[in-house]
Amino acid sequence: PTEPFDGNSVELDLPADREYDCETRTLSLGDDTGGGSDEAVTGTVTATFYACPDGMTFETLDTSQCDVITDGFDFGFQGDVNVHLSDATPSGDGYVWSGLDSIYADNGDPVTWSHIVYSYPAGYDWIAYSYDGGPVMEPHAGGFTFTADQPEHTVDVYFIQH
């Protein structure tokens, strides 16, 4: 018989009053404590937005000169669904999106979340950003995933001119 299991091992209780001709097989599973793609978690993103001085481009970006802004734009993430600023909760100087999926329910593949600017603040047409305190970058393909080890991400978004 087949015995389904969710963990990395299963114990079978076999009736003692029968004889068994058993074939033993060992299945080694990868260590999923690092948040493998088969482990569903819900993630949280915290974002802070900055408006940089008029005329500042990526090449001249000095993040210390940018001021926090909280309205006049629409920003979000694309993953298994699209979320907007209106789906986030204001928190301090930024916004928090919570309850974001880590895997697609229909096939168990990991969800990659990518940022998207739905509308820029007046006078801006480009962004630079930093995930989790990393380097400030221009937009590019890719995104982030949620794992058991990293169920939260932070992003700083700098509105600039292109």
Image (cartoon, rainbow, N blue to C red):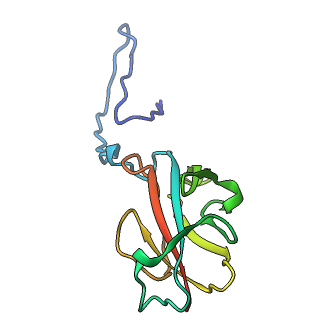
Residue with the most extreme top position: 17
Q: Is residue 144 visible?
A: no
| Count of numbered marks | 0
Can you tell which quarter of the image residue 59 is in?
bottom left
Check the image and report above or below for 77 versus 16.
below
Residue drawn at the location 50% of the way across and 58% of the way down: 110
Residue 85 image offset from top left, x and y in percent: 67, 61
Residue 98 image offset from top left, x and y in percent: 58, 48
Q: Nearer the viewer, residue 122 or 46?
A: 122
Q: Nearer the viewer, residue 98 or 62?
A: 62
Check the image and report above or below for 8 versus 30.
above
Report whether 46 appears left or right of 83. Answer: left
Q: Nearer the viewer, residue 71 or 138?
A: 71
Residue drawn at the location 52% of the way across and 80% of the way down: 52
The quadrant of the picture occupied by the C terminus is bottom right
Residue 76 image offset from top left, x and y in percent: 63, 65
Report whether 19 appears left or right of 111. Answer: left
Can you tell which quarter of the image residue 17 is in?
top left
Report whether 71 appears left or right of 148. Answer: right
Q: Nearer the viewer, residue 128 or 81?
A: 128
Q: Is residue 61 visible?
A: yes
Check the image and report above or below for 29 versus 136.
above
Residue 29 image offset from top left, x and y in percent: 32, 45
